[in-house]
Image: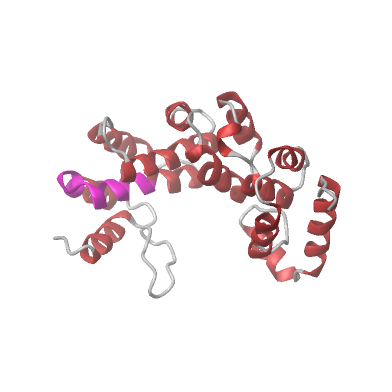
Amino acid sequence: MSETTAADVMAELAELATIEDRKMRSVNEKRGDDHGVNLSKLRVIAKRLKMQQDLALELRATDDTAARLLALLICRPKAFERDELDAILRASRAPKVHDWLVNYVVKKNPCAEELRVTWSADADPVVASAGWALTSERVGKKPEGMDLPVLLDTVEAEMKYAPDRLQWAMNHPLAHIGIEHSEHRARAIDIGEHLEVLKDYPTPPNCTSPYAPSWISEMVSRQGGA
């Protein structure tokens, strides 16, 4: 069986893009993602290819968003050095590429904590949002050693006027602190009510609002808490 090349994959992605309807591309573009490939079909390709670091690097080197997304699904997260991940993140401006990089690669890399601290304080709000996404993960799964009151201080001081993407990322640890840490719940709710960030965010029926006080109350209620 011949080895799948980057050219083969790019041709397959181009074919997928031509058969997807314009509506999908339009929806993606509204989110800042410049492709029309169905992500479920992209995952099917990734499952077939399995992990291939060299191929992933070739696809990553293209200027094609769909190819870069596929690269993130077939790469080896632990194979990247800290500076490589930093450079890749700074070059990843499409929201979906940015999100998948953080969730599928950085979170599984040994340098995740170091990058979390560095990125959270970065002047670039897109980079900072990656740091706050990692902070949200840490708050929920490994809060030991974190100064949650100081984290709440930072959210209270900076989230209100942060750019949308960074604001969204900062809102998640605020909610998770309130949900997972009952000793800080009242303050997290108070901060959310004071800032009113995402209070009027359009939320479909039967979905949880991202507005922190509502989100916290809903999740605590589901857990049987007070």
Q: Which residue is at a point 47% across and 42% down the rendered structure image?
A: 166
Name the quadrant of the C terminus.
Answer: bottom left
Q: Is residue 159 visible?
A: no
Out of 56 and 39, give the one closest to the viewer.
56
Question: In this rendering, is residue 11 above or below 221?
Answer: above
For the point 34% across and 45% down, the residue is 173
Task: Name the residue nearer the viewer: 159 or 67.
Answer: 67
**Measured from the top left, where is residue 136 in percent x and y?**
38, 43
Q: Residue at x 72, y 61 (%)?
A: 37
Position of 159 relative to 116 (above/below): below
Q: Residue 28 colored magenta?
A: no
Q: Residue at x 62, y 49 (%)?
A: 73
Image spot of residue 163 (x, y percent): 49, 42
Q: Which residues are magenta?
A: 171-186
Q: Position of residue 17 (x, y in %)?
A: 78, 62
Relative placement, left or right, of 207 versus 69 is left
111 w.r.t. 53: above or below:
above
- Image side of residue 65 versus residue 89, left or right: right
